[in-house]
């Protein structure tokens, strides 16, 4: 039996009857996998941690400062209505403009308040059940975080769960100019640059829970393709929280309905079996 090894992680065996047998040798630990997926980048809130109660509380506090004395908009009357507005909004600016009825000037004022209020908040934030195990199992891939949260807050929570060493780069709110936050891909390239990856590496996965995360991944891919025509940034929607990607106008490449789905999708991508989007 003759053996032919290919550089895509596949071994072909030709039998005496000239039948070709295709064998995958995929393992997460195998260096061949790293050639397929360069790095995995994550969103933070709603993807790694369930922070909806904290975000609801902070948003309420900020609006009370930006427009003091004005009644809260319906989207802030309850946590359920807040989550519904978040799902419907295309991004956080859309949320503040069209669901909280702020002006452009008030949005510019509200944005920088997030860091201060997050540092003061005493509302606990928990990681999603099982996400720690997923991060550890993906530990042979370079991993990073691109978030609108505060970097110090993210590091503190990762350290609490002994996960900080799995992330080579964390980009937070202060690392990105206010006018270049998601879905602008500026933060994506900051994160990748900090990870010190090889120039020829062009395949990424970005995991997030919001429509703007999908647009973020698509914008990053478009920018990469200007110099690397075969570049890919696969978007993976984290739909194991309250969100529902079926309502999004921008559709993700893949959907994780549970945290373990992430492992399955990464495996399929590495094996070359995930050529069709998993859309709702």
Image (cartoon, rainbow, N blue to C red):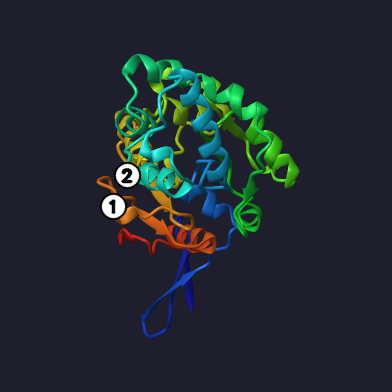
Q: Position of residue 96 (x, y in %)?
A: 37, 29
Q: Residues within 10 Å of mark 2 (few under 14, many from 20)?
A: some
Distance in Å between CA atoms under marks 1 and 2: 8 Å
Q: Secondary structure at mark 1?
A: helix
The mark lying in front, picked from 1 and 2, is 2
* Residue 124 rendering spot, x and y as whole percentages: 67, 43
Query: Residue 60's spot in the image, x, y percent?
Result: 50, 32
Residue appearing at x 59%, y 57% in the figure:
30
Q: Position of residue 177 (x, y in %)?
A: 45, 17
Residue of label 2: 88
Check contact, mark 1 vs mark 2: CB within 8 A: yes
Which quadrant: the C terminus?
bottom left
Q: Residues within 10 Å of mark 1 (few under 14, many from 20)?
A: few
Name the quadrant containing residue 195.
top right
Question: Reading the chain from its start, which is encountered first: label 1 or label 2?
Answer: 2
Residue 113 appears anywhere in the view: yes
Q: Is residue 164 visible?
A: no
Task: Name the residue located 32 percent from the left edge and 27 percent from the top edge.
Answer: 101
Does residue 218 appear left or right of residue 68 in this picture?
Answer: left
Q: Secondary structure at mark 2?
A: helix
Q: In the image shown, does 274 or 227 lie closer to the viewer? A: 274
Residue identifier under label 1: 247
Residue lying farthest to the left in this orientation: 249
| Direction from residue 240 to residue 99 in the image, left or right | left
The vertical placement of 44 against 266, above or below, is: above
């Amino acid at each position: 039996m003759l053996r032919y090894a290919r550089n895509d992680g596949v071994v072909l065996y030709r039998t005496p009857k000239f039948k070709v047998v295709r064998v995958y040798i995929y393992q997460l630990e195998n260096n061949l996998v790293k050639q397929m997926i360069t790095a995995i980048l994550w969103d933070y809130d709603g993807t790694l941690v369930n922070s909806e109660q904290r975000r609801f509380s902070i948003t309420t506090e900020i609006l009370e400062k930006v427009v003091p004395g004005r009644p809260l908009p319906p989207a802030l009357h309850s946590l359920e209505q807040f989550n519904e507005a978040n799902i419907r909004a295309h991004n956080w600016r859309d949320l503040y403009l069209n669901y909280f009825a702020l002006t452009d000037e008030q949005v510019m004022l509200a944005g920088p308040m997030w860091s201060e209020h997050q540092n003061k908040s005493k509302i606990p934030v928990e990681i999603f059940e099982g996400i720690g195990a997923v991060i550890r199992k993906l530990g042979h891939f370079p991993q990073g975080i691109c978030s609108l949260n505060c970097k110090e807050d993210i590091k503190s929570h990762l350290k609490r769960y002994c996960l900080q060493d799995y992330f080579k780069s964390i980009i937070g709110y202060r690392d990105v100019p206010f006018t270049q936050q998601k879905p602008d891909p500026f933060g994506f390239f900051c994160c990748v640059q900090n990870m010190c990856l090889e120039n020829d590496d062009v395949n990424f996965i970005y995991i997030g829970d919001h429509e703007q995360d999908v647009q973020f991944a698509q914008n990053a891919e478009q920018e990469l393709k200007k110099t690397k025509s075969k570049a890919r940034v696969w978007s993976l929607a984290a739909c194991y929280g309250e969100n529902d990607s079926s309502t999004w106008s921008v559709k993700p490449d893949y959907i994780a309905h549970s945290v373990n789905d992430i492992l399955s999708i990464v495996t399929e991508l590495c094996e070359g079996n995930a050529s069709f989007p998993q859309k709702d």
